[in-house]
Image (cartoon, helix red, strand yellow):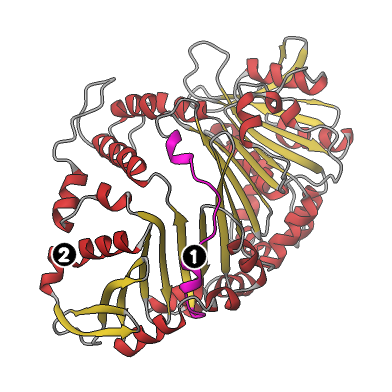
């Protein structure tokens, strides 16, 4: 048996790598795998638009990295020997030729149909440009077959790998299907030949989170996918695997849908908790506008803001979730949530000196931002000025402030912000805290009172929105319940990092894109408890 068959998972890894390289290229889509895959599909990744993928690889300089990797000593020979691919002197020629064989590709995960199988079944579907191209793909991967088998009425090939792992593959017309279980392979191959009346796109969960938007890359994940992974019982990051089951039973899981393009210039994500989840109240908030965004200066490089509705009730739910989640890192009997010991929320409240519930019920908008001047900002907008003063009193009463030296305040009109400084700070930076209208304002690492007063003088001028690029302005002015903005170079510079040095080892085109990255997005809550987030990074 060739080396490919002797290496566990090398075949599916090669196929997935091929899928990620190839994508799907046809412009018309009379039939997609969403109309073929069964309703109990756990996860589905669909790739489309091959010319755009190849263009993206070239524009980012990633094709150069791929060619460089293929030209390393021994890599070319190993690939040719194991995958049966003869590379041209310029690997780009071979890569381009392979890309031209395929139209679209899909990777999906399914519950096993064969009793005794522990792992979810992986399926790869490749739609080629025609039947002859599919035959060439079969020649490429089927040459390593160990046996010819019959699955139902379909002929297939079986490839055996280590650890009793095997793969079934076969062709119908322009389609090639590969699966890690014969039963699922037969089901999906049969559906490719004769599409069923009801498929994944007709399922309630898929209909709930997937809209009309389509991307060159789309992915759908069902809650049962997390359940199947949980069933493997693999601890991760200190989490007690025995406690994960009860935690998921209590809170449920999520449907997730993702759509994006290869250049990552637009990304859409929708998520929804399983019906009846205790977390569903978190997904309730009416669309609005971010008033605190108008406070920010033109030099803002980082912003995150969101509206708060029913803050106290949501905070109670969040606290319960955090307590249970932290409990998964302690010992527990199988099937039980473990004791949490000290309440982490109560511990934190003891340090800050006030109740998070009391704070949450007074807040209606939150904004976190970073700007060249005055610095880092935390803004909590209350329902009225009385509550804003109560929030301010909470923060000025934090015991840790007693360790700082209080200095001269910043004053603009009726607003007075107290100032605090760390003794011996070599840069002489100052922290300001106080109330401005209906908002508690905290500014960290400000140069001096003059910088703080200059910020207060421009509040409401909209300097931030006037300074961001068009794609960012488009996102930040959308109605919703959350917004965000990032200028990567500005953030790195503020953190004393040199963007030019950080990206100098990357291809020039990719480094340039990262240095100039300005991403913005907004989030909103749709009907049926579905959250939607849209992110734009602008043209490359």
Q: Nearer the viewer, residue 241 or 297?
A: 297
* Residue at 51% across, 10% down: 115
**Which residue is denoted by mark 2 in the rendering?**
397
Q: Which residues are magenta?
A: 280-299
Mark identifier at residue 520: none
**Which residue is denoted by mark 1 in the rendering?**
291
Position of 191 with respect to 318 (left or right) is right
- The outermost residue toward the bottom is 450
The local secondary structure at tag 2 comes to loop
The local secondary structure at tag 1 comes to loop
Q: Is residue 2 visible?
A: no
Q: Nearer the viewer, residue 518 or 524?
A: 524
Q: CA distance from mark 1 to mark 2?
A: 27 Å
Packing grade of label 2 (10 A; few <14, some 14-19, many >=20) is some
Position of 110 with respect to 387 (left or right) is right
Q: Earlier in the sequence, mark 1 or mark 2?
A: 1
* Residue at 38% across, 28% down: 248
Q: Is residue 289 visible?
A: yes
Give x and y (percent) for residue 415.
32, 78
Check the image and report above or below for 522 versus 297.
above
Q: Nearer the viewer, residue 451 or 344?
A: 451
Residue 128 falls in which quadrant of the image? Answer: top right
Q: Are marks 1 and 2 in contact (CB under 8 Å)?
A: no
The N terminus is located in which quarter? top right
Residue 279 in magenta?
no
Give x and y (percent) for residue 338.
21, 28
């Amino acid at each position: 048996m060739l080396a490919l068959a002797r290496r566990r998972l090398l075949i599916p890894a090669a196929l997935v790598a091929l899928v990620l390289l190839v994508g799907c290229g046809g412009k018309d889509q009379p039939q997609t795998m969403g109309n073929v895959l069964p309703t109990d599909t756990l996860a589905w990744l669909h790739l489309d638009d091959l010319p755009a993928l190849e263009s993206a690889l070239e524009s980012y300089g990633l094709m150069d990295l791929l060619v460089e990797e293929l030209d390393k000593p021994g890599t070319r020979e190993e690939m040719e020997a194991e995958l049966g691919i003869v590379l041209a002197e310029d690997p780009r020629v071979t890569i381009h030729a392979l890309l031209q064989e395929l139209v679209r590709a899909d990777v999906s995960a399914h519950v096993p149909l064969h009793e005794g199988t522990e792992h979810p079944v992986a399926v790869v579907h490749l739609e080629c440009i025609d039947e002859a191209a599919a035959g060439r793909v079969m020649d490429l991967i089927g040459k390593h077959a160990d046996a010819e088998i019959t699955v139902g009425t379909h002929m297939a090939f079986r490839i055996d790998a280590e650890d009793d792992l095997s793969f079934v593959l076969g062709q119908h017309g322009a389609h090639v299907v590969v699966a890690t279980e014969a039963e699922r392979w037969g089901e999906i191959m049969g559906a490719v030949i004769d599409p069923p009346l009801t498929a994944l796109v007709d399922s309630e969960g898929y209909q709930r989170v997937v809209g009309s938007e389509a991307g060159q890359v789309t992915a759908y994940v069902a809650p049962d996918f997390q359940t199947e992974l949980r069933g493997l019982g693999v601890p991760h990051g200190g989490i007690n695997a025995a406690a994960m089951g009860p935690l998921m039973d209590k809170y449920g899981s999520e449907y997730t849908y993702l759509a994006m393009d290869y250049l990552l210039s637009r990304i859409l994500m929708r998520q929804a908790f399983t019906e009846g989840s205790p977390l569903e109240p978190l997904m309730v908030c009416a669309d609005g506008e971010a008033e605190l965004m108008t406070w920010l200066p033109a030099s803002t490089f980082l912003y995150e803001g969101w509206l708060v509705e029913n803050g106290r009730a949501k905070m109670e739910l969040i606290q319960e979730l955090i307590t249970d989640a932290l409990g998964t890192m302690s010992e527990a009997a199988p099937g039980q949530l473990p004791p949490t010991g000290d309440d982490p929320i109560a511990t934190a409240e003891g340090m800050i000196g006030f109740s998070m519930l009391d704070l949450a019920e007074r807040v209606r908008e939150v904004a976190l931002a970073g700007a060249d001047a005055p610095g880092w900002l935390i803004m909590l907008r209350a329902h009225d000025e009385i509550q804003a003063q109560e929030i301010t009193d909470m923060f000025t009463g934090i015991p840790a402030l007693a360790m700082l030296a209080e200095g001269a305040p910043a004053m603009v009109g009726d607003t007075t912000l107290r100032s605090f400084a760390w003794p011996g700070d070599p840069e002489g930076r100052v922290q300001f805290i106080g109330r401005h209208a209906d908002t508690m304002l905290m500014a960290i690492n400000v140069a001096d009172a003059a910088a703080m007063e200059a910020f207060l003088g421009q509040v409401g001028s909209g300097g931030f929105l006037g300074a961001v690029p068009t794609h960012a302005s488009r996102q930040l002015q959308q109605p919703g319940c959350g917004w965000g903005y990032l200028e990567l170079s500005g953030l790195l510079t503020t953190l004393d990092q040199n963007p030019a040095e950080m990206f100098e080892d990357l291809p020039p085109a990719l480094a340039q894109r990262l240095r100039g990255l300005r991403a913005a997005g907004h989030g909103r809550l749709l009907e049926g408890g579905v959250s939607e987030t849209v992110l734009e990074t602008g043209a490359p």
